[in-house]
Image (tube, rainbow, N blue to C red):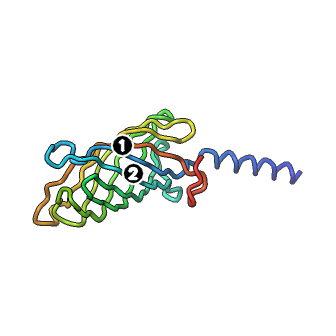
Amino acid sequence: MSKKWLFVFIFFLQSVQAVVPPDLFSFAIGAFDFYREKNRTWEFEAEYKFHARALKSPIDCLEFCPLLGLMATAKGTVYVYGGINFDLLFWDHLLIAPGFAAGYYHAGGGKNLGYPLEFRSGIELAWQFKDWHRLGVHFYHLSNASLGNRNPGEESLVLYYDIPIKKGFPFICN
């Protein structure tokens, strides 16, 4: 009798693990400061998105997703940041994810945003495939919230692709 319950318990654990979203490694390419032609340039990003299993949402379609990232432009700008996305997944495929981040900004040969601490606010729209891969667009705004003497801000629009990470570090991809 105890073997039967052990089998049921193991089966239950495996089915629970199957629905837990994996962490994601994301790559993006797009336009930095795409509203203003003067400073417009290519932008490249890499992000690691964690699914915060400890932060349980009261809403079934909402997932808290902390992230760490690096953005660089063709003009030598670098932005290193950490933040959180609020993943809203509808019909198991359509993702809408507003998010916020803060980080260190170095202008390099690109646009001077007026202060090394910059805040990012944006929204992602993506399609999540059955195997957890995602393809989407991300629109965001960078600003120093008037901490510096200058606060010109900038807007970026990027195309991104998320790759699920099966076991976390060292990046064993599905």
Task: Indicate which disc residue 85 carries.
Answer: 2
Which label belongs to residue 148? none
Could you tell me which residue is drawn at 89 percent across and 51 percent down?
1
Q: Residue at 31% across / 63% down in the picture?
A: 103
Dot 2 and dot 1 residues touching (CB under 8 Å): yes
Quick one: label 1, few (<14), some, or many (20+) residues within 10 Å?
Answer: many
Task: Between residue 113 and residue 140, name the one nearer to us.
Answer: 113
Residue 161 percent location from the top left of the image:
44, 43
**With 92 as the anchor, is 30 left or right in this view?**
left
Up/down of 128 relative to 80, above or below: above
Residue 154, image x, y percentages? 20, 51
Q: Amino acid at mark 2?
A: Asn
- Around disc 2, counting alpha carbons within 10 Å, would you say few (fewer than 14), some (14 to 19), or many (20 or more)? many
Q: Position of residue 21 (x, y in %)?
A: 55, 48
38 with respect to 56 (left or right): left
Q: Secondary structure at mark 1?
A: strand
Q: Earlier in the sequence, mark 2 or mark 1?
A: 2
Q: Residue furthest right?
A: 1
> Three-letter amino acid code at disc 1?
Glu
- In the figure, residue 158 lies in which quadrant? top left
Q: In the current view of this chain or complex, which residue is farthest to the left?
A: 149
Residue in the foreground of this view, choosing between 26 and 22: 26
Judging by the rendered image, the residue that carries numbered circle 1 is 124
> Can you tell which quarter of the image residue 80 is in?
bottom left
